[in-house]
């Protein structure tokens, strides 16, 4: 699994990842080899090809917006299981808007605050350290993963989507989780083996000893992807 982000001891979710990997192995028998890839390295062509899953982690502003977007695009186009959390959610929407919807001028206010067309803007109320209820769409991937119509989730972000959401929907992206005010908090891409992004941070749920269902679902999708890849004639097992 490729962990895309600029690893830092000051980002809580980065410190949580090793605990989650160990818990996935111990509790669920899901053994994953995780490789950290900086957003700068992710700019290189094929940086995340050959992996069985890509997780774009929090920690924005990323050192390379282009690298984060390239990793997301590769996972989306190549059918590789994908998860984006917090900043990963924001950049997932940005990549989809630019590369699928043709909205090439949209920007993220954290990266380009003076841009004319901001897709991601500061939230009216910061969600740093906030917990809130997320309601999921019946019949969605999110519902099947979370296993309940609602869930209380943890946030640590100050930015969210504010424009062009109908255009993203028209091009196939589904918003399948919303907060109490109806604002989108989960996005997914139907027809993809596993493609999900959450504004909340499932990696921060609990104490790390019981991985959040979203994290567990990504791990299961990665294992399935590896198994299918290994069974294809002439294809060696991916990392």
Image: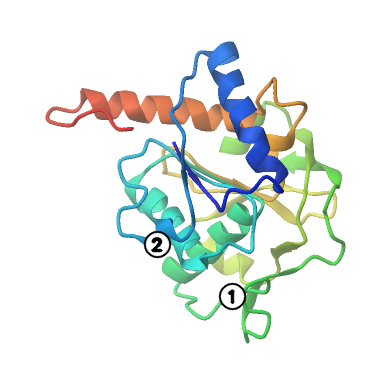
Q: Is residue 67 visible?
A: yes
Residue at image mark 1: 107
Residue 125 vs residue 151: left or right? right
Where is the N terminus found, in terms of image quarters? top left
Q: Which of pointers 1 and 2 indicates the residue nearer the eye?
A: 2
Residue at image mark 2: 43
User: Which image quadrant is residue 87 in?
Assistant: bottom right
**Residue 136 vertical placement versus 167 (above, below):** above
- Disc 1 to disc 2, C-alpha distance: 18 Å
Point 78% across, 39% down: residue: 153
Where is the C terminus found, in terms of image quarters? top left
Of helix, strand and loop, which one carries label 1? strand
N-terminal-most mark, 1 or 2: 2
**Residue 225 vertical placement versus 170 (above, below):** above
Of helix, strand and loop, which one carries label 2? helix
**Label placed on residue 176:** none
Q: Front-most of 200 and 140?
A: 200
Point 56% across, 26% down: residue: 21
Q: Position of residue 32 (x, y in %)?
A: 45, 26
Q: Position of residue 228 (x, y in %)?
A: 29, 26
Q: Front-most of 105 and 163?
A: 105
Point 72% across, 28% down: residue: 148
Local packing at callout 2 (Cα closer than 10 Å; few below 14, some 14-19, many 20+) is some
Q: Position of residue 184 (x, y in %)?
A: 70, 54
Q: Front-most of 206 and 104?
A: 206
* Mark 1–mark 2 CB contact (< 8 Å): no
Q: Position of residue 199 (x, y in %)?
A: 69, 51
User: Which image quadrant is residue 99 in?
Assistant: bottom left
Q: Is residue 140 visible?
A: no
């Amino acid at each position: 699994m490729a962990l895309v982000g600029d690893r830092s001891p000051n980002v809580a979710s980065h410190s949580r990842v090793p605990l989650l990997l160990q818990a996935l192995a111990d509790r669920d028998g899901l053994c994953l080899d995780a490789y950290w890839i900086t957003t700068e390295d992710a700019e290189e062509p094929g940086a995340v090809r050959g992996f069985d899953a890509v997780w774009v982690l929090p920690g924005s502003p990323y050192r390379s917006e282009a690298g984060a977007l390239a990793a997301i695009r590769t996972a989306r186009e190549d059918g590789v299981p994908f998860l984006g959390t917090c900043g990963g959610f924001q950049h997932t929407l940005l990549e989809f808007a630019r590369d699928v919807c043709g909205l090439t001028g949209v920007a993220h206010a954290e990266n380009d605050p003076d841009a004319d067309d901001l897709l991601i803007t500061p939230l009216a109320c910061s969600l740093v350290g906030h917990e809130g209820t997320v309601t999921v769409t019946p019949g969605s991937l999110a519902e099947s993963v979370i296993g309940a119509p609602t869930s209380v989730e943890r946030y640590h972000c100050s930015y969210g989507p504010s424009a062009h959401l109908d255009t993203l929907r028209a091009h196939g992206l589904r918003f399948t989780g919303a907060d109490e005010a109806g604002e989108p908090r989960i996005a997914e891409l139907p027809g993809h083996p596993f493609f999900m992004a959450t504004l909340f941070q499932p990696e921060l749920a609990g104490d790390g000893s019981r991985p959040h269902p979203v994290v567990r679902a990504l791990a299961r999708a990665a294992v399935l992807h590896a198994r299918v890849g290994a069974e294809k004639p002439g294809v060696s097992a991916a990392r």
